[in-house]
Amino acid sequence: EAGVTQSPTHLIKTRGQQATLRCSPISGHTSVYWYQQALGLGLQFLLWYDEGEERNRGNFPPRFSGRQFPNYSSELNVNALELEDSALYLCASSRGLAGVSYNEQFFGPGTRLTVL
Amino acid sequence: GENVEQHPSTLSVQEGDSAVIKCTYSDSASNYFPWYKQELGKGPQLIIDIRSNVGEKKDQRIAVTLNKTAKHFSLHITETQPEDSAVYFCAASRGGTSYGKLTFGQGTILTVHP
């Protein structure tokens, strides 16, 4: 069974540009989560999508946005990039809300975003 | 919101020794506590988790204990091997409207010396 996949592996942008990161969940999973892992810091929760809807959002500015497609894959968009946005962006997936009390989240390898 | 504190930040042991990593959480409504192992250049890998209705769980050389009263949970690795060297993260989550969000500790760099 294929795990969570993310693309691209690396992304280099300049300040002010926009970045788009993509994630495909494990087959059968309907929930997708995005986390930011900045150097020296732990994982910070960004966004959670389930069944195409945004379910929860972390303490990040509105220029961090995303969406989930009908096939449950997801996209994270970061507008007006700032130097401090440089980080590893991790996507995780889990079974969806229906009938699930605990959400085991399985992570992809991440996209390394560098803002120059 | 939830806050998770993890200690120690670095841990160095000899092969065959045991390693213990401890976490405390602030939200008494948290009911799910996973542990992740992250190797260099890879995403975090779920290695074990515990629910709030259980005090202890074991999987081969790995065990996790939970003390709900003290809001404290720990990861125990016995008979450590060099391949156990990695960064370990604890996390906590609650149900309801905050379901889905994992709050992570700051991580522990474990080094196992051959």
Image (cartoon, rainbow, N blue to C red):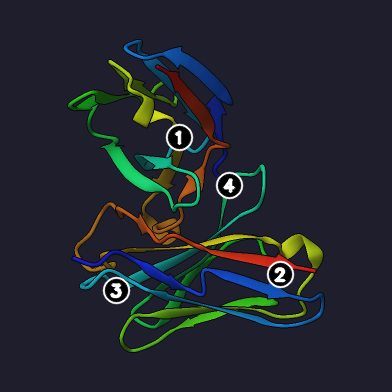
Reading the image, the residue beneath label 4 is B1
Left or right: B64 with respect to A41? Answer: left
Q: How crowded is the residue under tag 1: few (<14 C-alpha within 10 Å), some, or many (20+)?
A: some
The chain under label 1 reads B
Q: Is residue A70 visible?
A: yes
Residues indicated by labels 2 and 4 sit on the same polypeptide chain: no
Pair 3/1: label in front: 1
Q: Please provide percent x and percent y for residue B8.
A: 55, 21
Residue at image position (28%, 52%) is: A102
Mark 1 vs mark 4: in front = 1
Inspect the image, locate mark 4, and give the three-letter code of the amino acid beneath it: Gly
Whole-number angstrom distance, CA of label 1 to CA of label 2:
31 Å
* Cα–Cα gap, marks 3 and 1: 29 Å
* Residue highlighted by disc 3: A30
The residue at the point 57 percent across, 23 percent down is B10
Q: Which type of secondary structure does the marked residue at label 3 adopt? A: loop
Circle on res. A15: none
Q: Are marks 4 and 3 in contact (CB under 8 Å)?
A: no
Counting from the top left corner in percent of width and height, residue B111 is at 48, 24
Say which residue label 2 marks: A61
Confirm whether residue B8 shows in the render. Answer: no
For marks 4 and 3, give the CA distance: 26 Å
Indicate the position of residue B23 as horizontal and vertical percent values. Answer: 48, 27
Q: Are marks 1 and 2 in contact (CB under 8 Å)?
A: no
Q: Earlier in the sequence, mark 2 or mark 3?
A: 3
Residue marked by disc 1 = B86
- Mark 2 residue type: Pro
Q: CA distance from mark 2 to mark 3?
A: 25 Å
